[in-house]
Image: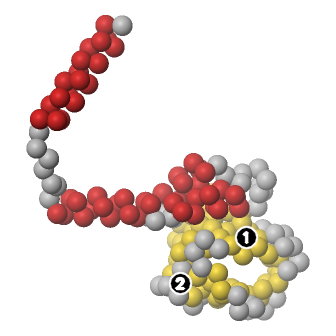
Amino acid sequence: MVGDIEMTRDLEAWSVLSLALQPVAPPPELRGRLMGSIERSARFRPFSRDLARWFDLTERAARDLLARVDDPAAWEPGVGPILGFMHFAPGPRVAPAHCGLVRMKDRARVPLHRHVEREVTLVLEGGVVDGDGTRYGPGQALEMPPGSAHTLRVVGNPEALLAVVQADIDVIAG
């Protein structure tokens, strides 16, 4: 009880003091870094609901995952057209499928392949074109049912960022 009263007094004192002070703008370099950090962490926020739905995650888990996109330590190096991969565990309705965020180079191609199980590709940045010529941009998802076959090509950006639910595939042509 005494601690609560002291804390209330401290908060009141800080409130009064903050009102008495004149605001001071941060130095331009600090402001730029802060604003850049806020913009980077928020740029994928519009996709958190779709990511949660497609991957059976809570929206909080989806937001937390998307907040790690700019953390180099969260990524494993890729091979060939794949620049990097960030693994994550899906929710129970999607498990045991393998899920991850994938960065791919512009004009990277995924050869003709057939899906043994369902695949979902949610575009977060850049774009992809399916073998039938359909283009998918940020916020759009491509769902391939078991037995379906297609190719995929990255377009329109230096790279694409994709969220992928992938299980077994059979490569038909390289």
Q: Quadrant of the C terminus?
A: bottom right
Q: Residue at x 75, y 91 (%)?
A: 132
The residue carrying mark 1 is 120
In terms of secondary structure, where does tag 2 sit? strand
Which comes before the other along the chain, label 2 or label 1?
2
Q: Position of residue 21 (x, y in %)?
A: 11, 39
Q: Residue at x 76, y 73 (%)?
A: 143
Task: Name the foreground residue: 6 vs 16.
Answer: 16
Task: Name the foreground residue: 116 vs 42.
Answer: 42
Residue farthest top in this picture: 2
The residue carrying mark 2 is 105
Left or right for 149, reference 38: right
Quarter where residue 103 is shown: bottom right
Q: Position of residue 115 (x, y in %)?
A: 83, 76
Q: Is residue 97 above or below residue 11?
A: below
Q: Position of residue 34 (x, y in %)?
A: 28, 58
Q: Residues within 10 Å of mark 2 (few under 14, many from 20)?
A: many
Q: Quadrant of the N terminus?
A: top left
What's under tag 1, amino acid-wise? Answer: Val
Task: Name the foreground residue: 15 vs 125.
Answer: 15
In this rendering, does residue 128 appear at all?
A: yes
Quarter where residue 70 is shown: bottom left
Q: How is the image coloured?
A: secondary structure
Q: Is residue 125 above or below residue 152?
A: above
In terms of secondary structure, where does tag 1 sit? strand
Q: Residue at x 57, y 63 (%)?
A: 47
Task: Name the foreground residue: 78 vs 25.
Answer: 25
